[in-house]
Image (tube, rainbow, N blue to C red):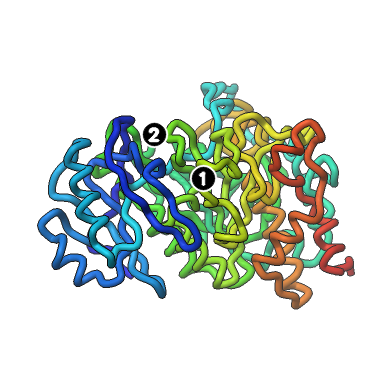
């Protein structure tokens, strides 16, 4: 589907705005969900009839559809004016009177799910002809319980991820990095990013080449694709933030098949607008991710760095799998040694599995080694951003081995295996669930796949 009008991730301000109820599938979300979200000019709506909606509300703005479901059409409603709190209240009241509208809310902002540990300045290193080999420092590659067991899995047919495609939805990437193969798919990769480090770091964890230098990706022979866009900013939302996570998810879904992997490296504001949450909290993202997993694609989603309990009543069941299930694997963050939940990681019964949320060695940033933009490495990648690609790499390896053995693992079964296997979360934080740390070997045993 082509987009006639680009999407703006709208900024929010903390000022009383509007009341009203937005309906989900099996529950309602009250005014707290959108109470303080006032956009620059964009509302996300789901309507039964786009033409009828446009004829009724065309005086307020222009509707551009972007995703069609069985129950209605999602679209951007771009207002003709910049609303203040009073105007926003009037707009939302008008929309709430229209019974053909299932959802209406101001658009949330996506931000990378990383923490500040990796924001230290790059260290300029003396020029050397060859990049050192940092694989030995990548503890997440090692056998369980230290790592996911990638080094052992590489000896199994398909264990390098060669049968799987992965698309990472990100900010932007240094796609000319020395440790990367040419991506099989580039949905977008803006060259006017403030930094390419975040996407570069995720790419390195999953698919960096094993060539005796730099780092090695968990699924280093997988085909890697990218979709980058510049995330929104709270104080300044304009045309530079047009790139849409919606286009990214749809593009990835179109270019992947059953058994492949989508990685969601974004987070968005939730009911507490000072804290970030998983992107599927918002219904328009949820519906698109559900379409991807329905196709058989494994979706790995960062839980976000809000330090929030997803079982809290303020979420009104948004993360209750009995009521609402995107099919995605949701990833929290733990310490590399003790496997305890890190304080910034969101948690709750919805979380399926965890990865290392600090001290991750990968490509980008330059605090470990820095010769040029395409020769930068870090030992400090962090957040649910660093945790999610560790799990994504393990899933890609397991899926690839299964395909080599002519087995098919559904997204539901993959998630169930991740929940039932792996290294248990540390005892001090077990009541704040982020899930076990994955073990490829245990997952293969669960599937009854043996080495040849």
Q: Nearer the viewer, residue 352 or 366?
A: 352
Which residue carries the number 2 mark? 194
| Residue 324 appears in view | yes
Instruction: Give coordinates of residue 8: x percent, y percent.
Output: 29, 48
Q: Residue at x 48, y 50 (%)?
A: 281
Task: State which mark lies toward you, 2 or 1.
Answer: 1
Q: Secondary structure at mark 1?
A: helix
Mark found first going from the N terminus, 2 or 1: 2
Provide residue 54's location: percent of width, then percent of height: 17, 65
Residue at 75 percent of width and 42 percent of height:
140
Q: Where in the figure is residue 273, as x and y percent of width and height?
A: 42, 35
Left or right of residue 280, residue 138 in this image:
right
Q: Is residue 328 above or below residue 230?
A: below
SS under mark 2: loop
Q: Quadrant of residue 158?
A: bottom right
What label sits on residue 315 in the rendered view?
Answer: 1
Q: Is residue 292 above or below residue 120?
A: below
Q: Residue at x 21, y 61 (%)?
A: 63
Left or right, residue 159 beside residue 358: right
**Which residue ends up furthest to the bottom in the rendered image?**
406
- In the image, residue 54 above or below residue 384: below
**How much space separates mark 2 and mark 1, taking CA atoms?**
33 Å
Point out the image quarter for the C terminus.
bottom right
Does the rendering let one see residue 375?
Answer: no
Q: Residue furthest left?
A: 59
Q: Nearer the viewer, residue 6 or 282?
A: 282
* Residue 344 located left or right of residue 4: right
Q: Residue at x 54, y 34 (%)?
A: 306
Picture quadrant where residue 191 is located: top left
């Amino acid at each position: 589907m082509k987009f006639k009008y680009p999407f703006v991730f709208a900024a929010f301000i903390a000022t009383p705005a509007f009341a009203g109820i937005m309906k989900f599938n099996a529950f309602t979300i009250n005014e707290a969900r959108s109470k303080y979200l006032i956009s620059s000019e964009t509302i996300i709506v789901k309507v039964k009839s786009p033409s009828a909606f446009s004829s009724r509300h065309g005086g307020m703005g222009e509707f551009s559809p972007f995703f069609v479901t069985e129950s209605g059409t999602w679209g951007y409603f771009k207002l003709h004016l910049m609303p203040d709190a009073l105007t926003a209240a009037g707009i939302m009241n008008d929309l709430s009177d229209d019974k053909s509208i299932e959802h209406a809310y101001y658009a949330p902002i996506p931000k990378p799910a990383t923490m500040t540990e990796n924001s230290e300045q790059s260290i300029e290193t003396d020029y050397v002809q060859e990049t050192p080999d940092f694989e030995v420092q990548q503890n997440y590659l090692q056998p369980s319980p230290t790592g996911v067991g990638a080094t052992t899995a590489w000896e199994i047919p398909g264990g390098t991820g060669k049968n799987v495609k992965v698309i990472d939805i990100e900010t932007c990437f240094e796609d000319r990095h020395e440790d990367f193969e040419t991506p099989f798919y580039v949905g977008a990769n803006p060259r006017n990013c403030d930094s390419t480090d975040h996407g570069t770091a995720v790419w390195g964890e999953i698919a960096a080449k094993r060539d005796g230098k730099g780092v090695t990706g968990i699924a280093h022979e997988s085909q890697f694709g990218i979709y980058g866009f510049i995330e929104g900013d709270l104080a300044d939302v304009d045309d530079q933030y047009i790139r849409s996570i919606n286009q990214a998810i749809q593009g990835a879904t179109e270019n992947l098949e059953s058994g492949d992997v989508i990685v969601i490296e974004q987070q968005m504001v939730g009911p507490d607008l000072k804290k970030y949450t998983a992107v599927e909290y918002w219904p328009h993202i949820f519906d698109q991710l559900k379409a991807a997993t329905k196709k058989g694609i494994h979706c790995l989603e960062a839980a976000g760095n809000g330090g929030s309990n997803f079982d809290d009543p303020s979420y009104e069941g948004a993360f209750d799998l009995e009521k609402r299930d995107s099919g995605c694997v949701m990833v929290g963050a733990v310490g590399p040694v003790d496997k305890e939940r890190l304080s910034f990681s969101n948690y709750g019964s919805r979380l399926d599995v965890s990865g290392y949320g600090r001290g991750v060695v990968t490509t980008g940033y330059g605090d470990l080694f820095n010769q040029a933009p395409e020769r930068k490495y870090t030992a400090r990648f962090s957040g649910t951003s660093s945790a999610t690609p560790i799990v994504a790499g393990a899933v890609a390896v397991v899926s690839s081995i299964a395909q080599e053995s002519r087995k098919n693992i559904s997204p539901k079964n993959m998630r169930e295996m991740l929940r039932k296997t792996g290294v248990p979360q540390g005892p001090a934080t077990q009541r704040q669930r982020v899930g076990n740390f994955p073990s490829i070997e245990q997952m293969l045993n669960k599937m009854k796949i043996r080495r040849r």
